[in-house]
Amino acid sequence: MSVVSIAVAGASGRMGRMLVEAVLASPDCRLSGALDLPDSPALGQDAGAFLGRTTGVAVTADLRTGLAGADVLIDFTRPEGTLTHLALCRELGVRMVIGTTGFTPQQKAEIAAAAQQIGVVFAPNMSVGVNVVLKLLETAAKALADGYDIEIVEAHHRHKVDAPSGTALAMGEAVARALGQDLSEHAVFAREGHTGERKPGTIGFATIRGGDIVGDHTVLFAGTGERIEISHRSNSRANYAAGSVRAARFLVAHGPGLYGMADVLGL
């Protein structure tokens, strides 16, 4: 059995620790590196210390040290940091799993350009369940194209810095694509004051931020006399971590290219 060597970015953060734990729990994977910011109090500590484990991998801010020997880097940090990591991964031939959200169109183009040379799985949500929901939404949108208003409601913890969430946008894109629409022309992100009646064909978004909510998403199809709701609720970041490790395995078996979780899951 071949072993996949995985480095984790943001290794001492909430998601980073989940990723480290998921890698260590996978018999076919090896933690090869743990990256964090230069001001992280975890620098120099063993990456498995929070689990009471000794991995022999120290948390480092030196990118080349952290990526040494890695087959894949899993990154759930911030757009600017992810793009810095991407540039070096491209140079070193290290594949990337990118779960970071909040990229601009220009930044997404940078990721696509890098994917011409290295394998990249880029998805707003690595959860297997969420990606199954995206497929269900395509089916629902086609069947409910006439006579149903579509609203997307998402909720996350107070620390999330982008809105709507990348997952909510992906859900909107899945619906719009099924309807033959461009989401940018039909999305409504804010309502305040005298808005008038709801414009037919629009896709509304509502955002909630508070507490420690990991991630809740609901797509509402509201018709006359009935409504259909397709929801996904995350109780733990562990599902994102498990999907990311699955994506890392996928990358080592495939060549350069820009992939999504639908590719990883065969959807």
Image: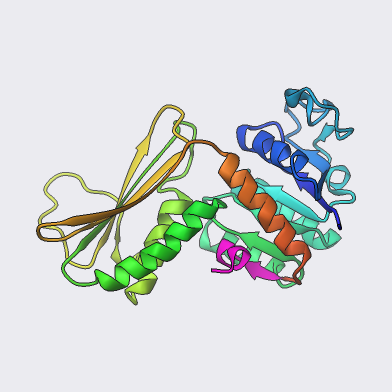
Is residue 35 positioned above or below 198 on the image? above
Say which of 81 and 94 sits in front. Answer: 94
Look at the image and give the residue range highlighted in magenta: 257-267
> In the image, 99: left or right of 46?
left
Q: Please give the name of the residue rendered at 72% of the width and 56% of the height, measured from the top-left corner.
A: 248
- How many marks do you count on the picture? 0
Say which of 226 and 176 sits in front. Answer: 226
Q: Where is residue 18 in the image (x, y as percent from the top left)?
A: 65, 36
Residue 59: say if magenta: no
Q: Where is residue 24 in the image (x, y as percent from the top left)?
A: 77, 39
Say which of 247 and 91 sits in front. Answer: 247
Is residue 167 positioned above or below 42 on the image? below
Residue 258: say if magenta: yes
Is residue 134 positioned above or below 194 on the image? below
Residue 128 falls in image quadrant:
bottom right
Tell me how the rendering is colored: rainbow
Q: Please give the name of the residue rendered at 58% of the width and 46% of the height, measured from the top-left corner.
A: 240
Residue 142 falls in image quadrant:
bottom left
Q: Please give the name of the residue rendered at 52% of the width and 63% of the height, measured from the top-left corner.
A: 105
Determine if residue 52 is in view. Answer: yes
Determine if residue 185 is in view. Answer: no
Q: Position of residue 263 (x, y in %)?
A: 60, 68
> In the image, 214: left or right of 182?
right
> In the image, 71: left or right of 169?
right
Q: In which quarter of the image is the N terminus?
A: bottom right
Q: Where is residue 52 in the image (x, y as percent from the top left)?
A: 78, 22
Residue sitting at the far bottom: 180
